[in-house]
Amino acid sequence: MHLLNKKIYIIDDNRAVCDSLKFLFYSVLNIDVETYDTSTGFLDKFSSKWEGCLIVDYAMPALNGVELIKKLQERNNTMGIIVISGNSTPAMIKNAFTAGAQSFITKPFKIDDFLAQVRHILGNNVPEAS
Amino acid sequence: MTTSTLFNIQPRSLQEQHIENKALQEQLAHIDYLFHATRDAIAVLDSNLFLRRMNSSFKDLFYKIFGIEIQLDMNLSASLESFSSEKNNLVLACKQALDTQQCIAVINENGQLHQNNYYCSEILISPTYDAKYEHELILGIRDLTTVKLLEHERYKQQVNLAHAYKDSVKRELTSAIAHELNQPLTAIMAYARACVMKWHALSQQSDLSHILEQILLQAEHADKLIQSVRKIVKKEDLYYEPFDLELLIEECILILGYILEDYIVNIKINSPSNLMIIADRTQILQVLLNLCRNRIEAFKFSFKANPKLMISVEMEDKMVVVHIKDNGPGIPEDLQNLLFNSYCSSKPQGMGIGLVICFSIIQQHHGSIQLHASSKEGTWFTFSLPIDGHRACTF
């Protein structure tokens, strides 16, 4: 699978987080990034044919990150999912993994660790840096 | 017409007089019986404070308070010689009462509420008013020890509750500040890292690279500070204990009495009796208080007629479900989705932290809380808890 077909989708109600991560991925991974500030906005557009990596904030109004993941799994999502969260408890982490997330990272995260996890999900053909 | 006919005076026979005397004696005996049998402690003193009559309750209570076996014809003032402050208090009240004023003397031990040796009694001293007789005083002692101890216990509970609430607010605020600071910090770190990488990719050597690294380092340092503050105020473990949920709801309404004094709301509780659950009693009381107080205060700002609040409890599987419904003004639509994880409030002075605390407490109990419905017709909140304190929900 070529990287060109893959995208990173960021769903976070904090605009600054979305924009900064988009800038980071553009700069470092040279990959297309789409950002959404609501779960419902993302669900409206979602297609099970999409490939890449999902980065989902845990606490969001209306539909939180875990509820969103459950809905995506019902719709046959094949993308790997990283949950990012401003705080964490064992129950939150368990919730996220049980719903189908591959990783759970607490904000603010070590950017290099975060990038490593995104790379892992996208596959081995991701460039080290642009 | 004779005088006797005019006034209808008829000489009574000796037998009639005897019957009347007997009836009078029976009535007096009856009064005497009541005087001795009543659980109220009653005694009669003459104007020199000598004890003329008393019942056994008075004798017992007097002994309980002063440790003195009081007898008829004893002088009250003399018998209390070794209790100077109580004696002064009581004798002064008696003297005031002799001036035809009803007086109350309160006797309590140093005013200290210690469960083992505390006592509190109220002595009501009433003068007799009949001018024909020498003044007499009627003393009635009421033992208020249990009442006062209960009052004190309730006060202590409320103080504990206030402390617990303050702690929750502190924890939630700290957590909220940490959470909000984490967002910009994440953005700063992502931007800075991207810039460092871009700069390196351009193979540029200048101070800018060092400055960007510094931005990143400082942001990481700020993150560590936030984490350490979080650790200090981390949530305490729950104190699980079995308790009757219906009684807890009644206690909640009792505590909210101060609001209901100003604003009358018709409150109905519908719960199975003797429903024992295992949870942190103080924390669940906090949830009930927050939810009910919010609903009652919402009425205040709406001026709605015939305000009603209904609290009902149901069992579902191994969960206990509490419904809180009202016919108040409802919660504004734009706030409904944000209630439990944002600091929003529809009250003019509201901080919006109450429901966040409720959410946090119920989540810690492995339960769930939600706003079922809210419109102009009213609001319906529901929360559920595992009845035995164990995790019954599945992830």
Image (cartoon, rainbow, N blue to C red):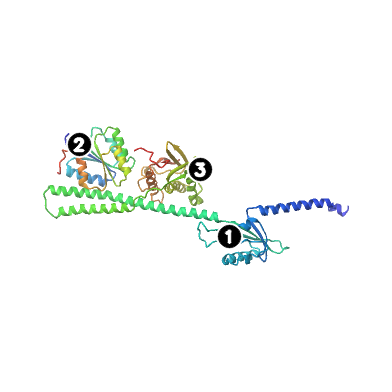
Q: CA distance from mark 1 to mark 2?
A: 87 Å
Q: Residue B69: name its quadrant.
A: bottom right
Question: Could you say whether the residue bearing mark 2 is in a helix, strand or loop?
Answer: strand
Residue carrying label 3:
B268
Q: Mark 1 — on which chain does it sit?
A: B
What's the mark number on residue A6?
2
Q: Earlier in the sequence, mark 1 or mark 3?
A: 1
The quarter in which the C terminus of chain B is drawn is: top left
Q: Is residue A88 above or below residue B58?
A: above
Q: Mark 2 — on which chain does it sit?
A: A
Q: Is residue B107 found left or right of B171 in the rendered image? A: right
Question: Would you say the residues marked 1 and 3 are in contact, meaning their CB atoms lie under 8 Å apart?
Answer: no
Residue carrying label 1:
B65
Q: CA distance from mark 1 to mark 3?
A: 42 Å
Residue B331 point in image, percent of width and height? 41, 44
The disc labelled 2 sits on which kind of residue?
Answer: Lys
Q: Is residue B8 found left or right of B241 in the rendered image? A: right
Residue found at x 23% / y 50%: B188
Residue found at x 24% / y 37%: A80
The disc labelled 1 sits on which kind of residue?
Answer: Ile
Question: Could you say whether the residue bearing mark 1 is in a helix, strand or loop?
Answer: helix
The disc labelled 3 sits on which kind of residue?
Answer: Lys
Q: CA distance from mark 2 to mark 3?
A: 58 Å
